[in-house]
Amino acid sequence: MSAAPLFWSTPLRYCRWAARERPALFWSVIVGAAGPALMPIVPPIRHYFGDVDPAPVPVTYPGMRPSSFGHHGGLYEMVETDSSTVPNGPRKQLTGYDD
């Protein structure tokens, strides 16, 4: 077993040593560093090959809509719309599986 070279003095020699002696750590660092580097590259390639982003999951109750960007705080401020989508009758009483 040879002594590990110092990274800051000889980085290429250290990488060759780490690839032989500690391959799991070496490749996990390489893959982990590739993730942020590929973030601006991968989405256009996905769209080019026809992969589309899914519709956003609804985060509001029917009858509410998100306000426009930059309007009183941005996306998460809700503005009421007509309430015809919510029934006006009494709620149905659920039965069974009581605690």
Image (cartoon, rainbow, N blue to C red):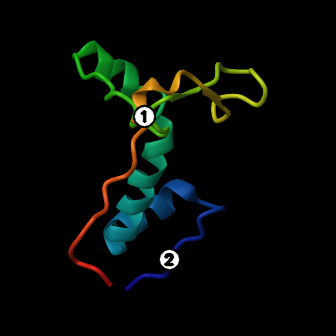
Farthest residue, direction top:
48
> In terms of secondary structure, where does tag 2 sit?
loop
Picture residue at 32% right of the left edge, 84% below the top: 99
Picture residue at 40% right of the left edge, 69% below the top: 25
State the residue in front, 26 or 75. 75
Q: Amino acid at mark 1?
A: Val
Q: Residues within 10 Å of mark 2 (few under 14, many from 20)?
A: few
C-alpha span from label 1 to label 2: 69 Å
Q: Position of residue 51 (x, y in %)?
A: 24, 22
Q: Amino acid at mark 2?
A: Ala
State the residue in front, 19 or 79. 79
Q: Position of residue 41 (x, y in %)?
A: 43, 26
Dot in front, 1 or 2: 1
Residue 4 numbered mark, or none: 2
Quadrant containing the N terminus in the rendered view: bottom left
Q: Mark 1 = which residue?
A: 86
Is residue 91 depicted above or below 68 in this figure? Answer: below
